Image: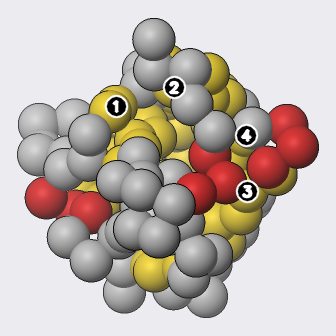
Amino acid sequence: DVQLQASGGGLVQAGGSLRLSCSASGFSIDEAAIGWFRQAPGKEPEGVSCMSGWGRTYYEDFVKGRFTISKDDAKNTAYLHLNSLKPEDTGVYYCAAELPLSSSVLGGCSQYSAGMDYRGKGTQVTVSS
């Protein structure tokens, strides 16, 4: 049973930092693509960042240079490091996964923002001005 659970959110002042964790179970993240998304109040979910099964990273323009995605395969956990936070970064952040199709076709990020195979519950990030 594939499960994903985001954690690590909280209330932080503008300019502050947080580290979000995405704990995975039921599959191994080392060959999967892991994406991070967020949903602000009254808005549609949007993609934030993705790491493919090959380790290639993707960032949306509005977080480039501020957020960093990483994985710890041994802990089967992915992370999103949020730095230089802005009030407009406020929202519920959640992680999602695309599993590999085979040992040679690993999880990809080319269209991650349109949605991924599995989505977990989110964690609230609130940035005060």
Residue 111 is labelled as none
Q: Is residue 61 above or below residue 127?
A: below
Residue type for callout 2: Leu
Q: Which residue is mark 1?
A: 119
* Residue 70 % position (x, y): 71, 63
Dot 3 corresponds to which residue?
Answer: 71
Give the Cα distance between marks 2 and 3.
14 Å
Q: Secondary structure at mark 4?
A: strand
The answer for how far apart the CA atoms under marks 3 and 1 are is 17 Å
Residue 66: x, y in percent? 62, 78
Which residue is at the far right?
A: 74
**In contact (CB < 8 Å): disc 4 and disc 3:** yes
Discs 2, 4 touching: Cβ within 8 Å? no
Which is more N-terminal, label 4 or label 2?
Answer: 2
Q: Which residue is the site of mark 2? A: 4
Q: Amino acid at mark 3?
A: Lys
Taking the spot 61% from the left edge, 22% from the top edge, the residue there is 25
Q: Nearer the viewer, residue 47 or 104?
A: 104
Q: Would you place residue 21 above or below residue 36 in this image?
A: above
**Which residue is at the front of the view, 28 or 60?**
28
Q: Nearer the viewer, residue 39 or 128?
A: 39
Q: Quadrant of residue 114?
A: bottom left
Identify which amino acid the numbered label 1 is placed on: Arg
Q: Earlier in the sequence, mark 4 or mark 3?
A: 3
Question: Dot 4 corresponds to which residue?
Answer: 77
Which of 107 and 23 lies nearest the eye of the viewer? 107
User: Could you tell me the amino acid type at mark 4?
Assistant: Thr
